[in-house]
Image: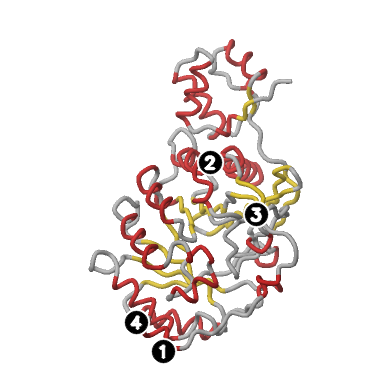
């Protein structure tokens, strides 16, 4: 039995190569690409400007297939969350966040996540596998065209994409880049590089590659101003410590579509939310950027608690004071508005349903207490 090729797996160059194997010229791939992504078509017979011979040939060798939807939830604030089946008992989540001036889609790149950040419920499930390009692109394809039908619109609904769903995108680089290129392609979704954001916990070599291969906006999960604390919160820091990460951010800015890096910072009660932490963060970014300071902004994220973390959300007044402290240092700082938390669609809540293939047995280490860092250590580091 022949397996059909899912055409969502290809960016335009990949689709052109596929068509070339069929004896078709590149312009046929462009036509096909537009039908799939701009019109949301999956029925080859309806693609009227394709040659009849190609329309008849494609159903036997190819398909356009989105992921099966397990569940859909709509928040009181209009946020929509889909749970997609990716096989073998695994499911991933995708979230659409509507606002007055944009529609943002948060896309997953892996079933689970191997980074295991302390404050992220996805990481606490462990890691199963990387998603394919078709599974990444398919989340956008499904969401865009489902929302158009629901809203009765023919214009684009999703204006921004953030790779901030389940998984560490840069640990699935090979599948990620073709998907990004499809998002940017004028024959598909035509998004600006400024409106596509990849979030990373700091996979330094892949940050450098992304800057060369497909530079889009970058958001870096920082969450701590010193290595001893970040080692505990973001285990990847033990491999790529803060100094190396910030140097990589400086290099990325040479190619980035924006003139700043966004630092994500999850506010944890009594852990990383003291005035001394803010002061040290300000000192850090001023020390990097080739001596001129690293051009950046901070996005403070209210922590969304879950039992296994052993962590608490910083009080609102402390978050506001922390933001003011950074702003007083001349750093642009925002506090992320929590969206979709009534359907577990807020930051750090995406959990899906993942078979953990990375860890077995009791997970006592995940529930350990984070040692408080003395103020003197923050100031002296």
Give the structural element (helix, strand or loop) at label 3.
strand
Quarter of the image with the N terminus is: top right
- Residue 129, given in percent of the width and then of the height, sits at 64, 47
The alpha-carbon separation of the residues under discs 4 and 3 comes to: 40 Å
Establish if 85 lies above or below 336.
Answer: above
Front: mark 4 or 3: 3
- Where is mark 2, residue-wise? 175
Mark 1–mark 3 Cα distance, whole angstroms, equals 37 Å
Return the disc, 2 or 3, that comes first in the chain's sequence. Answer: 3
Instruction: Write down the residue under mark 1.
Output: 376
N-term-proximal mark, 1 vs 4: 4
Disc number for residue 328: 4
Where's residue 264, x and y in %?
47, 67
Dot in front, 2 or 3: 3
Position of residue 123 in the picture relative to residue 164 (left or right)? right
Residue matched to label 3: 127
Residue at horizontal 56%, vertical 74%? 302
């Amino acid at each position: 039995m022949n397996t059909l090729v899912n055409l969502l797996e290809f960016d335009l160059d990949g689709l052109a190569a596929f068509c070339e194997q069929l004896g078709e010229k590149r312009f046929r791939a462009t036509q096909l690409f537009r039908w799939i992504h701009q019109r949301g078509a999956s029925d080859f017979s309806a693609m009227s400007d394709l040659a009849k011979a190609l329309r008849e040939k494609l159903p036997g060798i190819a398909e356009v297939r989105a992921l099966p939807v397990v569940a859909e939830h709509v928040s009181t604030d209009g946020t929509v969350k889909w749970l997609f089946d990716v096989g073998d008992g695994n499911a991933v989540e995708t979230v659409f966040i509507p606002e007055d001036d944009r529609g943002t889609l948060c896309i997953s790149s892996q079933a689970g996540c191997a980074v295991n950040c302390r404050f992220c419920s996805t990481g606490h499930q462990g890691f199963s596998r990387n998603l394919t390009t078709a599974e990444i692109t398919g989340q956008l394809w499904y969401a865009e065209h489902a929302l158009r039908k629901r809203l009765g619109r023919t214009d684009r609904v999703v204006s921004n994409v953030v790779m901030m769903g389940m998984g560490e995108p840069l640990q699935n680089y090979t599948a990620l880049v073709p998907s990004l290129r499809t998002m940017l392609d004028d024959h598909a979704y035509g998004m600006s590089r400024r409106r596509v954001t990849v979030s990373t916990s700091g996979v330094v070599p892949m940050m450098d590659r992304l800057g060369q291969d497909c530079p889009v906006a970058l958001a870096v999960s920082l969450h701590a101003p010193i290595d001893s604390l970040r080692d505990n919160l973001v285990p990847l820091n033990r491999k790529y410590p803060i100094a190396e990460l910030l140097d990589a951010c400086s290099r990325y800015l040479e190619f980035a579509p924006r003139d700043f890096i966004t630092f994500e910072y999850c506010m944890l009660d009594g852990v990383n939310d003291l005035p001394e932490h803010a002061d040290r963060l300000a000192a850090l970014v001023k020390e990097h950027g080739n001596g001129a300071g690293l051009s950046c902004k901070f996005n403070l994220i209210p922590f969304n608690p879950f039992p296994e973390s052993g962590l608490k959300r910083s009080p609102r007044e402390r978050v506001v004071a922390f933001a003011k402290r950074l702003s007083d240092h001349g750093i642009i700082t925002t506090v992320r508005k929590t969206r979709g938390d009534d359907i577990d669609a807020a930051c750090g809540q995406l959990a899906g349903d993942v078979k953990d293939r990375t860890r077995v047995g009791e997970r006592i280490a995940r529930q350990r207490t984070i040692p408080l860092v003395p103020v003197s250590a923050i100031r002296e580091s």
